Image (tube, rainbow, N blue to C red):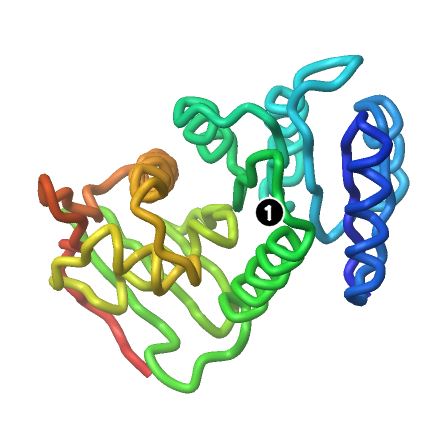
Amino acid sequence: MKLIYVVEDHDVIKDGVVQYLSINGYEAKGFGDLASVRNAIASRLPDLIIQDVMLPDGDGFMFIKEIKQRHPMLPVIFMTARTEESDRILGFEIGADDYISKPFSPKELVLRVNVLFRRIEGSSGRQTSDSRLSFEDGENVLVIDMDEHRLVINGKEISLTAAEWKIVTFLAQNEGRLISRGLILEKCFDYSFESYERVVDTHIKNIRAKLRPGNWIETVRGYGYRFSAPFSGEKG
């Protein structure tokens, strides 16, 4: 049973989300402040954090940024009344896997949780083909091992979030092909909203920062992205 921490200072919202997640087969625990969830994480790391932003003892964005430094692969969904595009972009820049704005339907939240776990499990499952990809950019070598769920550049393993892994492997498996933002949303996130296309840009920005040195992803203005490094290794 997946363990989910719900961090929300509004008791009605928190208790409702915890109850709805529990009904749908998850082990859910609610916390009304950052101090209590920080202590809980120290005792037991959850499979997912659903995080409010405005809390009585601090900022949820900064809290998740701190947690991500120690647990970069920990999935996070922000659940907040801060609905501006700049807030959503900040959330994804910090490393969130999804962002849901209040008010929201509990059913939609559970669907997003289900999608996120499917994405994580799908990205870590064994592949029957194209299990190892290798690319070169000058003196730099990038290797993607699907079976081991590892990405290595010049011998150094790179930590990626579930969303970043899906994007990188999707682009790499379509090396040389121009991929639109909409197709990335559809194939890597299981939903397609025009307002979320900038989320793709944010993930690409984070991925590029991690995949250094080397120029692995090309931007095609007004359309999307292309994994442009020449293929040099094994497939299958």
Q: Which residue is mark 1?
A: 73
Q: Callout 1: helix, strand or loop?
A: loop
Residue in view at x 88 percent, y 27 percent: 36
Asked which quadrant contains residue 9, the reply is top right
**143 relative to 84 in the view: left or right:** left
Residue in view at x 18 percent, y 50 percent: 225
In the current view of this chain or complex, which residue is farthest to the top? 57
Q: Position of residue 229 (x, y in %)?
A: 16, 55
Of residues 214 and 57, the one nearer the viewer is: 57
**177 relative to 30 in the view: left or right:** left
Residue in view at x 27 percent, y 38 percent: 213
Give the vertical position of 170 relative to 182 (above or below).
Answer: below
Tag 1: residue type? Answer: Met
Residue 139 visible here = no
Q: Quadrant of the C terminus?
A: bottom left
Q: Position of residue 137 (x, y in %)?
A: 17, 49
Q: Position of residue 107 (x, y in %)?
A: 66, 57
Q: Quadrant of the N terminus?
A: bottom right
